């Protein structure tokens, strides 16, 4: 196996161009497991951990530019207010050791439907930045996941950053695991309300072959929500929202849980996330007034 | 006044003796990561072994072609069953397991061939080039069918196991053990008449509860995977360094397979990364030795985590049907049980597990009429064998669940119902064996009920702290749907080996003077598997010989067998052996002092003791220092050395018709109270408190004892809420720590531990094995608490979120 260790982004892009089947590796929390268990034998590994640009994190044109190689620990510590859903999701990733190594870029590269950050990226309408020797382009997270573990990232491209819109309303993330930490999602849910555009964003994890949105639920809630005062929603509305979220899922029965349970849990999480959001929304509205 | 009171407890005079908590000799190394585990061994010219395993649970082997594998550069050997030099099968109780599969494979993951190469990746690649031609057969997956259906296909054909020509007379039944007492005794063996008796009892009962329970397959989940190194020796034998639980049992099985004498196979214990029963059976031992003898080079094996799930036995999953009938006052009238434990493809410890599951299968209760049918069966599922709790865990979940159900039916508090039916010293268990040692069950139950409760959620410093809520940091609730529940559990466990097994341990203790001070060396073959025997052996030597400096030599087969580090037995057995060997050393030291005229005339040995490095007379005070008495060993001073065996009292086999017999050496008990918060909408559980009361007879090392009780309770928590090797169609669905979940620190609640010391007159120091009992009772206590919170029946352990929210799995 060839192990490439570029020290600049240019070198990294050249390497990916020269080795389209090369597997990028950052924290190694996903890739190394596959190698150790002999599930994958790439001819080339491209180690991105020495590329400084990928570990940068900061504001950029009203958004947060999150380098693909920023660790979950830094997200938990630094983005609690500027990207609450993603920070909450990052807190649920594995253990402190893994959070020190693992990155959103890796989560996107592996594109496991159970990846913890996908629902938050979908709900908040984050944008994925891709680069190659041909140049840079951006793809909304909502168009990034194509099919099981297939993404919009092309053979010669590297994921360089994620652009996170500034939150204007409440954001939630919750994940089901059968133990209280360090667990892969049985299923997960994220919700974001955007009072500026009066739109609702959702994201569902481990609920379909790819991370998915519940678009019918988003539209339903956008129409039902009291964007001015955030007044309480009727029980029927909350319930309907939960049901619409669950019906967007196409889960499977597997060793982590049954399809029926996943749908049930999504509905419960969606209802709770909505009620927390209503409370948070009113707090936010009060502060503005 | 104090001056006239002689202190008889030697632990108070020699530092770090029995009853104190000295540091483990290997503790710092383990915490700092410097301890050498078996997987860390390395030799200059060693080869790496790899194992080709069956991809099918059940298949006929039509041919094995190793030609292509041998062509891989760096490969030194590829061996199959044809290369096994001696006996082709081995086994703990029955010799039924092929060293390498021939004719048939009987579980997925069964070893078929082994490779040695100069690099592990080379070995792996060569392995992929071995071609095995299989004719796939239907798996035999259903343990109830295997036990009861005469038309079930056989996993082992009759007569195919050497030395067992009668084999297999009972089809797939490895062992069937009935027990009949009271009114069932007279009608034993006649299904119709047993039914009549049962109906009569039902009519007499004020409350009857009947339920089917299941316990899933639990994994021991040790952290150090199977590993070891075999080094060929000049005498044609082999030296094996391996992480195991019983060196001599390994030796006894390895030597015949290699066609060698026992003395030519020498074992040394390598650093063991946990065991819990999973290292009782052989894994890579014979394979490494075969390859080492074949290549003339050291061969090292290290399984990876997934392979480890196929490389060791698990806890038997059980299917159980229980019926209990009680009178209106809560006293039990009768109980019946059918317990089927799935042994998987090979016997391992299944017959002994059935012996425990049957004899203790109705728990620590007075039951005048009992009917028990316990079966251990062959299937093509992963082999099951020893795990902490050994057959007593599964039935404890069932009988304790029954007790709760009965209490609810009769309107009694669950503790009250247990108190009314509690066994005590002098009681008999259903095998007719009298409990001839203290069993303060009623007191333990009452103490457990009286332990302070954890604070209510509303009293927490931050009730919104997600780490205190079910679902933890995953943020699924801020208190919505959270309901608290409380539950109790009691378990009765046999300690030490049972059923007529002549169980013993050997210790060699040597005393000499080095550098002007007395030093004691303790040599046994006992496996330190993390439990702390290495500390306890030193404590006993210090207490018995009054010498502070004790050296524990590595465990190997150069001294007699110590028996297994199993059955909570090592403090009792190897502790007992060290104690008696120390007694012999002490007697010789006294004789030396006498011979030198240092002991006053008329003074008996009972007046003498070894304290603070001196021979001390109760009446005349210090007589001589050991340094002066023995003299410097390097300068021809005396070396006092004794090797002694310690046997526990004999036990009996259960009789095959009525299941009667004094089959157990000692009984141990733990009582648990669990407090849980359940998210009833999502089916997630946070255990808030898991408090225990345990009688240990005598505390040898308070800190290690607490560790055993905490660890056992947590392993039981795992079985209650998350730990299950999921097997479907005889295939494991979750062979990884990604999907086989064990509790993290966030799942593990604070534990109050209340320890009683009621000495067992038969045991050294009055001690009682402590490692297993907590593993029994914590599971039913937690499930009972979840039941109280949810109102769900919860008949499957582990409880799944689906069970709590009411979705069929």
Image (cartoon, rainbow, N blue to C red):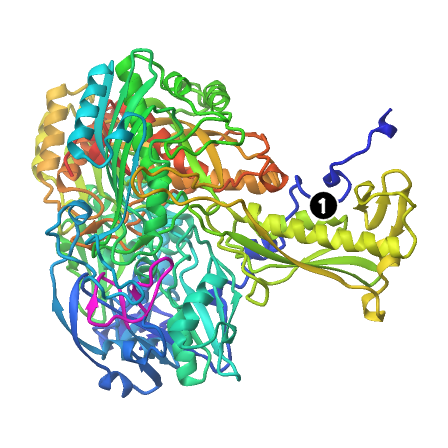
Answer whether residue A201 is visible to the viewer in this image. no
Q: Give the quadrant of the C terminus of chain B.
A: top left
For the residue pair A227 and B417, the one nearer the viewer reads as B417
For the residue pair B43 and A29, the one nearer the viewer reads as B43
Examine the residues drawn in magenta and state their main secondary structure.
Answer: loop
* Residue B754 in the image: above or below residue B554: above
Q: In percent of the image, x 28 and y 35: which residue is there?
A: B372
Q: Give the quadrant of the N terminus of chain B.
A: top right
- Residue B492: x and y in percent read 42, 34
For the residue pair B618 and A179, the one nearer the viewer reads as B618
Say left or right for A90 vs B167.
right
Q: Kindly identify which residue carries mark 1.
A: B543
Q: In percent of the image, x 42 and y 19: which residue is there?
A: B419
- Residue B743: x and y in percent read 38, 42
Say left or right for B6 vs B136.
right
The region drawn magenta spans B89-112
Q: Quadrant of residue A85?
A: top left
Answer whether residue B354 is visible to the viewer in this image. yes
- Residue B373: x and y in percent read 26, 38
Q: How many marks?
A: 1
> Secondary structure under badge 1?
helix
- Residue B355: x and y in percent read 35, 44
Say left or right for B752 vs A88.
right
Q: In percent of the image, x 44 and y 64: which residue is there?
A: B250
* Residue B329 in the image: above or below residue B176: above
Q: Residues within 10 Å of mark 1 (few under 14, many from 20)?
A: many
For the residue pair B605 and A11, the one nearer the viewer reads as B605
């Amino acid at each position: 196996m060839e192990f490439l260790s570029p020290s600049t982004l240019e070198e990294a892009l050249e390497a990916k161009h020269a080795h389209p089947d090369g597997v990028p590796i950052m924290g190694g929390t996903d890739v190394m497991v596959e190698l150790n268990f002999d599930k994958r034998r790439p001819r080339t590994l491209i180690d991105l951990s020495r590329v400084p640009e990928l570990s940068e994190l900061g504001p950029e044109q009203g958004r947060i530019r999150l380098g693909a190689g920023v660790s979950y620990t830094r997200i938990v510590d630094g983005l609690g207010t500027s990207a609450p859903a993603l920070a909450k999701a990052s807190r649920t990733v594995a253990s402190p050791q893994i959070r020190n190594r693992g990155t959103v870029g890796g989560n996107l590269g592996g594109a496991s439907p159970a990846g913890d950050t996908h629902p938050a990226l979908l709900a908040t309408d984050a944008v994925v930045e891709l680069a190659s020797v041909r140049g840079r382009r951006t793809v909304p997270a909502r168009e990034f996941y194509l099919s099981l573990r297939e993404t919009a990232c092309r053979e010669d491209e590297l994921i360089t950053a994620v652009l996170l819109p500034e939150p204007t309303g409440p954001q939630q993330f919750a994940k089901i695991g059968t133990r209280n930490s360090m667990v892969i999602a049985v299923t997960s849910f994220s919700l974001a309300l955007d009072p500026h555009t009066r739109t609702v964003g959702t994201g569902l994890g481990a609920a379909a072959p790819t991370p998915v949105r519940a678009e019918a639920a988003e539209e339903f809630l956008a129409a039902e929500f009291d964007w001015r005062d955030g007044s309480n929603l009727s029980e029927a509305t909350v319930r309907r929202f939960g049901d619409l979220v669950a019906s967007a899922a196409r889960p499977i029965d597997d060793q982590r849980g049954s399809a029926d349970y996943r749908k049930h849990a999504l509905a419960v999480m969606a209802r709770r996330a909505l009620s927390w959001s209503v409370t948070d929304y009113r707090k936010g509205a009060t502060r503005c007034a | 006044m104090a001056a006239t009171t002689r202190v008889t407890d030697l632990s108070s005079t020699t530092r770090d003796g029995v009853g104190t908590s000295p540091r483990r000799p290997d503790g710092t190394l383990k915490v700092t990561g410097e301890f050498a585990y078996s997987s860390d061994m390395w030799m200059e010219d060693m080869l790496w072994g790899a194992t080709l395993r069956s991809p099918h649970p059940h298949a006929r082997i039509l041919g094995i072609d190793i030609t292509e594998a041998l062509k891989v550069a760096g490969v030194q050997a590829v061996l199959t069953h044809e290369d096994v030099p001696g006996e082709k099968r081995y086994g703990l109780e029955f010799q039924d397991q092929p060293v390498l599969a021939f004719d048939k494979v009987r579980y997925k993951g069964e070893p078929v061939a082994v490779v040695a190469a100069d690099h592990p990746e080379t070995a792996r690649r060569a392995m992929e080039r071995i071609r095995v031609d299989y004719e796939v057969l239907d798996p035999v997956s259903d343990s109830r069918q295997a036990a009861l259906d005469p038309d079930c296909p056989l996993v082992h054909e009759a007569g195919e196991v050497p030395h067992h020509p009668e084999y297999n007379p009972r089809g797939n039944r490895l062992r069937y053990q009935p027990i009949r007492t009271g009114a069932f005794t007279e009608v034993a063996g006649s299904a119709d008449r047993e039914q009549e008796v049962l109906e009569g009892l039902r009519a007499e009962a004020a409350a009857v509860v009947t339920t089917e329970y299941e316990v899933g397959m639990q994994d021991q989940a040790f952290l150090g995977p199977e590993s070891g190194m075999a080094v060929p020796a000049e005498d044609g034998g082999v030296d094996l360094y391996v992480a195991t639980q019983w060196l001599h049992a390994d030796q006894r099985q390895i030597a015949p397979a290699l066609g060698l004498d026992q003395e030519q196979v020498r074992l040394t214990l390598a650093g063991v990364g946990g065991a819990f029963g999973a290292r009782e059976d052989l894994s890579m031992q014979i394979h490494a030795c075969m390859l080492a003898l074949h290549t003339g080079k050291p061969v090292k094996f290290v399984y990876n985590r997934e392979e480890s799930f196929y490389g060791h036995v698990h806890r038997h999953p059980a299917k159980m049907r229980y019926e209990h009938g009680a009178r209106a006052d809560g006293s039990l009238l009768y109980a019946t049980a059918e317990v089927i434990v799935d042994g998987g493809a090979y016997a391992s410890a299944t017959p002994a597990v059935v012996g425990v599951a049957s004899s203790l299968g109705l728990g620590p209760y007075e039951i005048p009429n009992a009917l028990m049918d316990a079966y251990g069966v062959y299937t093509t599922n992963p082999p099951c064998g020893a795990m902490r709790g050994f057959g007593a865990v599964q039935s404890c979940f069932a009988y304790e669940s029954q007790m709760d159900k009965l209490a609810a039916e009769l309107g009694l508090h669950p503790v009250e119902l247990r108190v009314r039916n509690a066994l005590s010293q002098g009681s008999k268990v259903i095998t007719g064996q009298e409990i001839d040692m203290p069993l303060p069950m009623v007191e333990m139950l009452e103490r457990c009920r009286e332990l302070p409760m954890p604070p209510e959620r509303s009293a927490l410093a931050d009730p919104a702290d997600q780490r205190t809520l079910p679902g933890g940091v995953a943020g699924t609730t801020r208190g919505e749907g959270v309901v608290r529940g409380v539950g109790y559990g009691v378990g009765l466990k046999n300690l030490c080996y049972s059923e007529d097994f002549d169980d013993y341990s050997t210790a060699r203790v040597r005393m000499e003077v080095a550098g002007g001070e007395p030093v004691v060396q303790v040599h046994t073959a006992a496996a330190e598997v993390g439990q702390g025997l290495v500390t306890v052996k030193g404590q006993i030597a210090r207490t018995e010989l009054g010498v502070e400096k004790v050296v524990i030599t590595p465990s190997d087969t150069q001294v007699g067998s110590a028996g297994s580090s199993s059955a909570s037995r090592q403090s009792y057995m190897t502790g007992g052996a060290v104690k008696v060997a120390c007694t012999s050393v002490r007697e010789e030291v006294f004789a030396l002092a006498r011979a030198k005229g240092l002991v006053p005339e008329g003074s008996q040995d009972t007046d003498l003791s070894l304290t603070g490095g001196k021979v001390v007379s109760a009446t005349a005070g210090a007589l001589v220092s050991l340094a002066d008495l023995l003299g410097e060993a390097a300068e021809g001073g005396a070396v006092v050395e004794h090797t002694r065996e310690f046997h526990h009292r004999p036990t009996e086999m259960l009789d095959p018709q009525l299941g009667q017999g004094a089959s157990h050496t000692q009984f141990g008990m733990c009582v648990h109270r669990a407090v849980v918060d359940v998210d009833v909408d999502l089916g997630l559980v946070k255990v808030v408190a898991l408090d225990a009361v345990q009688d240990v007879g005598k505390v040898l090392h308070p800190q290690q004892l607490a560790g055993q009780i905490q660890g056992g309770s947590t392993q039981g928590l795992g079985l209650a809420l998350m730990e299950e090797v999921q097997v479907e169609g005889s295939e494991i669905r979750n062979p990884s720590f990604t999907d086989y979940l064990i509790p993290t620190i966030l799942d593990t609640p604070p534990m109050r531990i209340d320890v009683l010391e009621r000495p067992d007159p038969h045991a050294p120091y009055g001690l009682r094995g402590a490692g297993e009992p907590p593993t029994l009772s914590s599971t039913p206590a937690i499930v009972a608490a979840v039941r109280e919170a949810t109102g769900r029946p919860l008949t499957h352990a582990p409880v799944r979120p689906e069970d709590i929210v009411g979705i069929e799995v």
